[in-house]
Amino acid sequence: MARYDFDLFVIGGGSGGVRAGRVAAGLGKKVAVAEEYRFGGTCVIRGCVPKKLFVYASQFPEHFADAAGYGWTVPEASFDWPTLIANKDREIGRLSGIYQQGVEKAGGTAIHSRATLVDAHTVHIENENRTVTADQILIATGGRPNPHAALPGHEYCIFSNEVFDLPELPKSIVIAGGGYIAVEFANIFHGLGVETTLIYRGKEILGRFDMDMRRTLHAAMEKKGIRVLCHTIFEEIQKNDDGRLAAIVTGGEVLVADQVMLAIGRIPNTEDLGLENVGVEIGVKGEILVDALSRTNVDNIWAIGDVTDRVQLTPVAIHEAMCFVETAFKDNPTEPDLDCIATAVFSQPEIGTVGLSEDEAAKRFAALEIYRASFRPMRNVMANRDDRMLAKLVVDADTRLVLGAHILGPDAGEMAQLLGISLKAGLTKDDFDRTMAVHPTIAEELVTMYKPSYLIRDGERIETA
């Protein structure tokens, strides 16, 4: 039997790579995890975590305004961008250290370097100019923002990587994209007092989400003061003499702003990894092609997370890592279960969703019952805030199975996590109806909608009496 320096070498120290390395090391395997930047990857360093911290920061103006309705007198507030950045950096540094320590405490080796493939069992560690061998190799290098290199002037734009470290808060920004990253940052910047415009090439923001959620959030964003332009793309970005940017969009309109941000998708980090040295197959987007067990076409090389372009979510990468360990080291072949994944958009108001949208369900099921409730949450009444909550259940009329649950409003993401358990368990609308409500809460609407708002039959909407 061949002898190697490591049982497992992981390229990429993000959520998926660290989880795989830590768990494998905990099994007594000799493991190394190489990360060229900072341990923690996209989620911890320049993604979910700092973004959520920015979301919290951007919500305070509304909290201050709402306080008056509850008898509080709040002095005029001011915001300091450098303080937010410094505190964010401190927290990210702490978390990055925890990720690295997790590998080391489990008995693994953490390597701060870019690592590339030399052959199927050999890895070159660039910072140390040496090679090591490994029985199994896992690639978990994640992805990065699409730079839109074909756009004239794209070099003047910022991306989600740079947005967390801007030297100063812009007074105005134009953001291109209609996915959750673009939508979330539009809400963040608006909440921080920045004049914000969002442009999107499609007919409505947040493609693949339920259309009720998409339209309602769009309207809420515009009501708050965010300008949203659909069917619109950048044609060119120019830099003015005063340092501001001029974004020329569809139809010739010129949007002038301090910053222009591109959030038009992400691409896998597969360049210059040495994949060609061992013949690892990649797809048209540069993604590493894997089978259902996350194995590449090279028997001992695996890939998980965003680099495979399957589902670009941190919990998915972690789940794939756990399945990889089961398969590679426990003789228990385990396929990642990527069905019925709950997710959230941390917009203002939030969206939480799990399962099928109404449109998706209508394509798969002949008869649907749609339960829908729109109301003003109690917290908004005394605050005199008109933001409304939207709760929606999509139900198979024949089996009564709840196919989709969608919420827009405060804490929708938290509710989506719990709804994910219900839908994953295959609960029916009758199970929801038998569940006692917690009153007074927003979530009680999910178990008190007894009559369908309307029906869907063979794709056609039928109003109920």
Image (cartoon, rainbow, N blue to C red):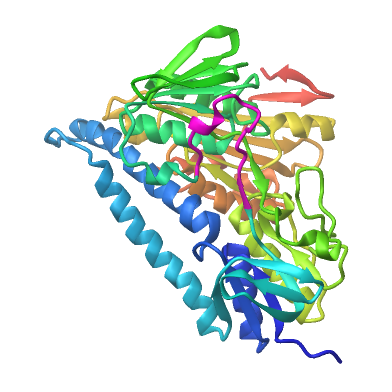
- Residue 217: percent from the left, percent from the top? 51, 27
Give the residue drawn at x 25%, y 32%. Answer: 66
Residue displayed at 35% across by 56% down:
89
Where does residue 230 sit, x and y in percent of width and height? 58, 18
Is-magenta flag for residue 159? yes
Q: Is residue 13 part of the magenta span, yes or no?
A: no
Q: Residue at x 45, y 27 (%)?
A: 375
Instruction: Say if 297 sits above or below 54 in the image.
Output: below
Residue 394 occupies quadrant: top right
Question: Is 406 located above or below residue 138 in the figure?
Answer: above
Report the front residue among 183 and 122.
122
Q: Is residue 452 visible?
A: no
Q: Main secondary structure of the magenta part?
A: loop
Residue 327 horizontal/vertical position (percent): 79, 74
Q: Residue at x 71, y 73 (%)?
A: 123
Q: Which residues are magenta?
A: 143-160
